[in-house]
Image: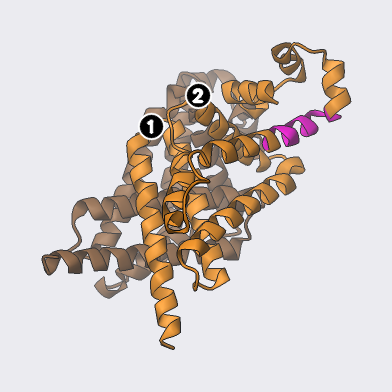
Chain colours: A brown, B orange
């Protein structure tokens, strides 16, 4: 899977040939077909691999944090997607490639939609830790916007249209804008306005 | 250019062969090379073509609107990117493809960065019409977030991960969140806090 992510990050999903992947991983193509059935199977497992890896590197340093750190944890988890590290670039490139190729090839759509949903749930639950009285639908739409924005900013960063530091600033500010909004909405509701 | 957009929307940038484009347009490959020099030239002109076309269909119905309609004009220009019309789908698919392929191929980067900048400037200037006293850098970052979010939501919509109506709701709310924020910042500044 690591090899597949590397090959996709180098030349795109459309550049992925099972032969090349086999060479990269140092195994036979037969073994790959045995394990993953077909090319779509390889892509599905690659998606799982990069999702797990992203979850790992975006939760670095978390864990020991107390409840008052919910906001830091959220910022951290989103901002760590913007790092000038080979692993992060590779991960985001592959994610963008899988998303882009799903426009042409419906095979991956269901898995991608599920992965997006899981991610959005995680972000919504972190937002809920910051705004415990905000209604669930408001948390969900905030989370959808933050994750979709992150994808948009990632593509710009990776294609050289947006400097890394500026992408991080835009993301950080978006988090604060959404948290403020959730606070105001809750206030409005509480006061029955 | 229309033929190139059609071919790219069907099979992606990586699927674009000059031979197929020539067949689609009913001309010789020699004529295409004569006009556009090379494949990168074709892509550059396709980018120009879809930018012009997007500007046309996102400003529909505008023009007769008075100053009090600045907000409607902004919403309109962003929401008209989410329409279940062949032209709009094709345009957004091609834009996403050019953006995604720029990660692997630096040839288009400069043109794409310029097109994004122009778009962001347009959105910032519409925001300025709504919040005339907001400082230029605040308008610019709001516009960057709105356009990057639009790209992210577009990819989700086109890949079947987000229903069209929901994408529009998320976008509309994002506009209102950014406009509110620009209002608050201005107020804060005016009051010297």
Vertically, is B180 above or below B159?
Answer: below
Q: Quadrant of residue B3?
A: top right
Q: Is residue B80 magenta?
A: no
Q: Judging from the image, what secondary structure is the residue with disc 2 in?
A: helix
Rendered location of residue B92, percent (x, y): 54, 35
Q: Is residue B44 magenta?
A: yes
Q: Which mark identifies residue A82?
A: none
| In this rendering, position of residue B190 left or right of residue A164 | left
Considering every residue shown, the one lying at the far bottom of the view is B192
Q: Quadrant of residue B175?
A: bottom left
Q: Which one is in front, B135 or B38?
A: B135
Rendered location of residue A166, percent (x, y): 58, 64
**Residue bounds of the magenta highlight:** B36-47
Mark 1 = which residue? Answer: A111
Mark 2 = which residue? Answer: B86
Q: Quadrant of residue A129?
A: bottom left
Residue drawn where x is 43% and y is 44% of the image: A51
Q: Which one is in front, A139 or B105?
A: A139
Q: Considering the image in quadrants, where does the C terminus of chain A appear?
A: bottom left
Rendered location of residue A17, percent (x, y): 62, 24
Query: Would you say residue A55 is visible in this rendering?
Result: no
Vertically, is A132 above or below B116?
Answer: below
């Amino acid at each position: 899977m690591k090899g597949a992510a590397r090959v996709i990050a180098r030349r795109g999903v459309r550049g992925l040939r099972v032969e090349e992947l086999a060479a990269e991983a140092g195994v036979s193509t037969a073994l790959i077909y045995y394990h993953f059935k077909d090319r779509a199977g390889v892509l599905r497992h690659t998606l799982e691999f990069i999702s797990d890896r992203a979850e790992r590197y975006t939760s670095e340093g978390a864990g020991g944090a107390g409840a008052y750190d919910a906001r830091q944890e959220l910022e951290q988890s989103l901002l760590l997607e913007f790092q000038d590290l080979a692993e992060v670039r590779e991960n985001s490139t592959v994610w963008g490639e899988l998303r882009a190729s799903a426009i042409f090839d419906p095979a991956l759509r269901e898995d991608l939609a599920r992965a997006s949903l899981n991610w959005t749930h995680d972000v919504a639950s972190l937002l809920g830790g910051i705004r415990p009285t905000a209604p669930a639908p408001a948390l969900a739409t905030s989370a959808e916007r933050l994750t979709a924005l992150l994808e948009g900013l990632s593509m710009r960063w990776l294609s050289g249209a947006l400097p890394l530091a500026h992408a991080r600033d835009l993301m950080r500010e978006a988090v604060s804008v959404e948290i403020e909004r959730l606070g105001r909405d809750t206030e409005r509701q509480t006061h029955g306005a």
